[in-house]
Image (cartoon, rainbow, N blue to C red):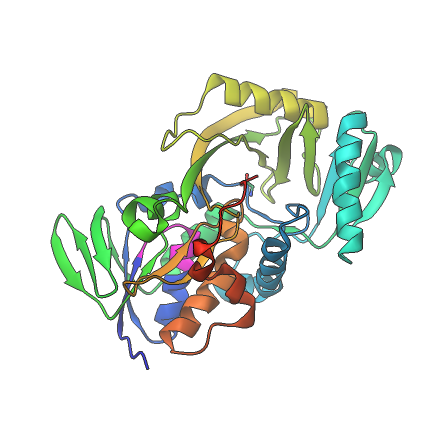
Amino acid sequence: MRNPQQVAVVGAGVVGLAVAWRAASAGYRVTVFDPDPGCSASWVAGGMLAPVTEAWPGEEDVLELGEESLRRWPDFAAELGDVGLSTAGTVVAALDRGDADQLDVLAGYLSRAGREAERVTGRELRKLEPGLGSVRSGLLVPGDLAVDNRRLLRLLRAKAGAEFVEAEVTGLAGDHVETGEGIRAFDAVVLAAGARSGRLHPALADVVRPVKGEILRLRPRRGSLPPPGRTVRAVVEGRPVYLVPRADGELVVGATQYEAGFDTAVTARGVRELLEAAERVFPSVAEYELAETAAGLRASSVDNLPVLGELPDGVYAAAGHHRNGLLLAPVTADAVLAWLAGRPVPDWAVPASPDRLRREPVDAR
Ligand code: GLY
């Protein structure tokens, strides 16, 4: 039976902070290590909590884990305070015939899987979101939510109840964490360092890799049409784009997806592609102020499922959340808390166990 008192969490992105907050609330003494706590992928992110519109045939475990976490989100948010949780839902817009065909694949899959998603015509979609450009058809997914990721991270950090160590971790095992300042002993160590997790632990080296995403933040100006009321997703010339409105009027447009190692430069091409796609979907964005460009590194795994569980040296892996770090934060924290308390692995966490890593990797989307 485990009896940890002192818990180290490596990584202060949404996953690490959620774990720290939950663990400290449960009575553990928690230390969070991160050399640059404000720079996680979850800070850059759009904030979609979208298991259904992120779903794809063959990724049923990802969908089910995402839905398990989505169910926790309203309480998770309410306990933290005003994190800007939007329940307005998501629409998916198909701009041309190719997009409509792709939407048919998603809609058919969701309907066979019994998920709530309604096919609508372009005209019906534009009635709901009049600022949309020319749209051939669409899909309404009322259950997918969104959160103001930056408000969320500020609140998590403020309420974490943990000691923060702003230092690069140079080594770790189940009973210690090493930084340039020395080695500190712990009863339990949780690795939640996002894309860096693969560099920090050999068991994750070939499993978790960075996938770059660039994102824009835009603000409507006087006289311009306000942003859409719902999250809008589309595929424009084969590239997915999403527009996530914030309560304060900001519109987040994302995201590119590149395998570029640990490069976080925002490229001219990335910005151009996102702006062109966003303008096709919602033409008024051309009038908006471009307030920010940023890039983050998703922590993608070999099968797009996170790795949740104990590694051979006793470190608990909470990594590899791919496009779903914000969505999966509540369920990840619950999995870690079950492990700290010595409870069995919850049924819903079994598919994400590191045991599966011995299987053949599949192509990442
Ligand atoms: N969750 C959306 C993205 O990773 O771009």
Residue in view at x 24 percent, y 71 percent: 187
Whether residue 131 is visible, yes or no, is no
Ligand 1 picture quarter: top right
Q: Quadrant of residue 223?
A: top right
**Quarter of the picture holding the C terminus:** top right
Q: Residue furthest left?
A: 182
Residue 257 or residue 79, whichever sits in front: 257
Residue 80 or residue 42, whichever sits in front: 42
347 vs 260: above or below: below
Question: Magenta span covers which residues?
Answer: 10-18
Residue in view at x 68 percent, y 26 percent: 236
Q: Is residue 216 left or right of residue 145?
A: left
Residue 62, how many percent across, how many down? Answer: 59, 54
Q: Quadrant of residue 8?
A: bottom left
Residue 274 or residue 83, whichever sits in front: 274
Residue in view at x 74 percent, y 42 percent: 91
Whether residue 198 is visible, yes or no, is yes
Q: Is residue 284 left or right of residue 171?
A: right
Residue 158 or residue 317, whichever sits in front: 317
Within the magenta stretch, is there residue 338? Answer: no
Residue 15, how many percent across, how many down? Answer: 43, 55
Q: Is residue 140 left or right of residue 313?
A: right
234 vs 115: above or below: above
316 vs 261: above or below: below
Q: Is residue 6 left or right of residue 291?
A: left
Residue in view at x 49 percent, y 49 percent: 360
Q: What is the tally of numbered marks visible in this picture? A: 0
Residue 120, how many percent across, how many down? Answer: 86, 41
**Quarter of the picture holding the N terminus:** bottom left
